Amino acid sequence: MNKLSSTPPIIPTFLWDEIDTVLLDMDGTLLDSYFDDYFWEEYVPRNFAEVNNISPEEARKTLLSRYRSVEKTLQWADLDFWSEQLGLDIPELKCKIDHLIQVHPYVIDFLKFITSQDKQLHLVTAAHSKTLKLKLGKTAIGPYFDRIIPAEEIGVAKESPQFWDILQQALGFSTDRTLLVDDNSNVLQAAQHYGIEHLVYVAKPSSRRPVKYSEDFPSIVFFKDLIF
């Protein structure tokens, strides 16, 4: 399993001349994951507690366990699944705190840089289609991408090597000339197993949490580190 460390990072060493296709994750990579962390760990448990007349602490413990039970599956990000499971209108709750949706520093600069470099640029996200619509509506990142591909369109989670096989067939990228940037080490490992050559880990997915570098993959804190 990928290890995280407070030691100095592995620095990305690829050259942009070696890259034709750039694949970017969304949550935690381009967007501050504070919104998602707060929503699932605090806001949903508080609403679940009120509906079920239990303490917020009990609700949080129960829900975190339920979240973990479907990690690395499409259900983990499926808002309709969680609405049914929890008896809450999850999309509506997301809209109520959508002011917390924020783009990481230097992301727009990086997207402009890539579009000026004549690269294929694709957003590859685990986010459910309803989440994707909300976040693209709240940010200015959407128009920069040649394609936006949620995992539900592929039919398997990004942690599965099969995801990358299906994605490669859809996009036609060369694995040795593709860069993937993601804040999920399990996703990077799956992509590495499939054969994607250039992999970068985002070491600060949330503005409210400390930097944690990967010991296995080159790491960045901000996208300005990839503008060279």
Image: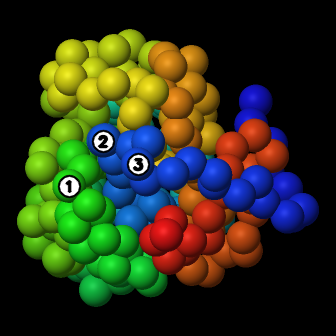
Toward the viewer: 60 or 168? 168
The disc label shown at residue 200, or none: none
Please give the name of the residue rendered at 16% of the width and 64% of the height, measured from the top-left corner: 144
Q: Give the farthest residue toward the front.
A: 17
- Secondary-structure class at tag 3: helix
Q: Which residue is mark 1?
A: 118
Toward the viewer: 196 or 85? 196
The correct choice, above or below, for 210 with respect to 10 in the image is below
- Badge 1 density bin: few <14, some 14–19, many ≥20, Cα 10 Å: few
Q: CA distance from mark 2 to mark 3?
A: 11 Å
Please give the name of the residue rendered at 85% of the width and 56% of the height, measured from the top-left corner: 5
* Left or right: 208, with 7 as reference point: left
The disc label shown at residue 21, or none: 2
| Quarter the N terminus occupies | top right
Can residue 128 be seen here? The reply is no
- Secondary-structure class at tag 2: strand
Q: CA distance from mark 1 to mark 3?
A: 11 Å
- Secondary-structure class at tag 1: loop
Q: Amino acid at mark 3?
A: Asp
* Left or right: 185, with 90 as reference point: right
Q: Which residue is mark 3?
A: 17
Toward the viewer: 126 or 79? 126
Of badges 2 and 3, nearer the viewer stands 3
Q: Position of residue 81 (x, y in %)?
A: 27, 37
Upstream in sequence: badge 1 or badge 3: 3
Q: CA distance from mark 1 to mark 2?
A: 9 Å
Of badges 1 and 2, nearer the viewer stands 1
Please give the name of the residue rendered at 25% of the width and 73% of the height, measured from the top-left corner: 112
- Badge 2 density bin: few <14, some 14–19, many ≥20, Cα 10 Å: many
Q: Position of residue 78 (x, y in %)?
A: 28, 40
| Callouts 2 and 3 close, C-beta under 8 Å | no
